[in-house]
Amino acid sequence: DIYICGVFGNIGGVTASNICRYDISGNTFYALGSGISGTAAYCLGFVGNELYIGGLYTSAGGISSSNICKYNISTSTYSPLGTGINSYCAFIQPIGLSLMFGGAFTVEGGITSNGIVKYNTTNPTFSAFTSNGLNSGGVCNTLSVVNNTIYISGGFSSAGGIAATNMSTYTFYNNDLNYVGGITFDNIDNYNNNFVEIKSTNVSGTNYNVILGKNKTFVV
C-alpha cells in the first residue's frame, strides 16, 4: 500500500480529505476515515504500524488535532499527539522509534522548541533541542539523514545557539546542533523551494555526501 497526503478532496473518484491509501494490487484508492480537516497534510512518517501525519490542520478523523497526529493502520483510528504544535509541520523524519519534526512552530506538547523537535514514540513525549532549537522565528523545511547525522535546512540564522545560515546538522553522538561551514542557502519563504535533500554516494571507494538545493549543489 501507498499512503498519500496533500491538498485534495477527491482522488481516483474517491472522496478523501487530504490523505488516502492506495492499494497497488487492486489499483484502488481508499479514504482514511474522515481524513484531515484543514489547509493540508504536508508530510508522513511511519513507525511500526502507526502513520504520523504533519501539516496545517485542526482535526484528524473528526478528532481535534493541532497540526500533527498519528493514524493506527491496524485499528484505523486517529490520535492527537498531546496538545500538538502551534504552527505547520513541514517534514517528518523517523529515526528508529523516534521522530524528528520540522516546521514553523515554536511550541510542541507544551514545551518550547523553535522549528525542530524530537518525539519519543515509546514514551510519548516531546523533547527540545539545545537553546530551544532554531532562532526565534526560524523555520525548518526539510530534514535528511546520512549515517548518524541529520541535515536540517530552512530559513534560520542560528541552530542550537550557534550561528548557522539556513543549514545545520544534528549528530546523535553528542546531541548537538552544528553549523555546516561554507554552505549558505538563500532564505526562501516557500517551504517547497529551499534545501531538497542529502544523498550519500561512493565514487572509486570514497564516500561523498551530495547536498541538493534550489539551483545549488554541493559535495562534502
Image: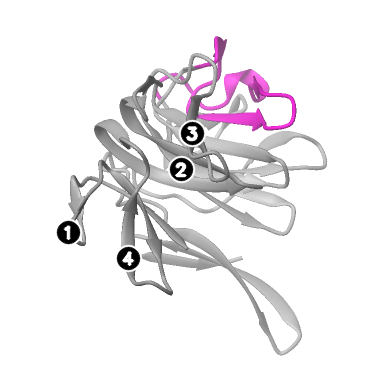
Residue extending farthest bottom = 204
Front residue (pair 45, 197): 45
The kind of residue tagged 3 is Thr
For label 2, the residue is 91
Label 1 with label 3: CB-CB less than 8 Å: no
Instruction: Check if residue 23 falls in the magenta segment.
Output: no
**Mark 2–mark 3 distance (CA, rounded to whole Å):** 22 Å
Tell me the mark number nearer the camera, choosing from 4 and 2: 4
Residue 158 percent across, percent down from the top left: 52, 30
Mark 1 or 2: the one toward you: 1
* Sequence-first tag of 1 and 3: 1
Q: Residue at x 32, y 37 (%)?
A: 35
Distance from Cα at disc 1 to Cα at disc 4: 10 Å
Q: Residues within 10 Å of mark 4 (few under 14, many from 20)?
A: some
Q: Residue 66 in the image: x percent, y percent?
A: 40, 21
Q: Between marks 4 and 2, how big is the CA–CA gap?
A: 27 Å
x and y, in percent, of residue 67 in the image:
39, 27
Query: Type of residue at label 1?
Result: Gly
Give the residue number, with chain letter if any, for mark 3: 77
Element marked by disc 3 = strand
- Specify the quadrant of the image occupied by residue 172: top right
How many residues crowd mark 3 within 10 Å: few (<14), some (14–19), many (20+)? Answer: some
* Left-right relation of 27 to 177: left
SS label for mark 2: strand
Where is mark 1, residue-wise?
Answer: 13
Circle nearer the N terminus (1, 4): 1
Residue at coordinates 48% horizontally, 33% vertically from top-left?
Answer: 77
As drawn, the label of residue 28 is: 4
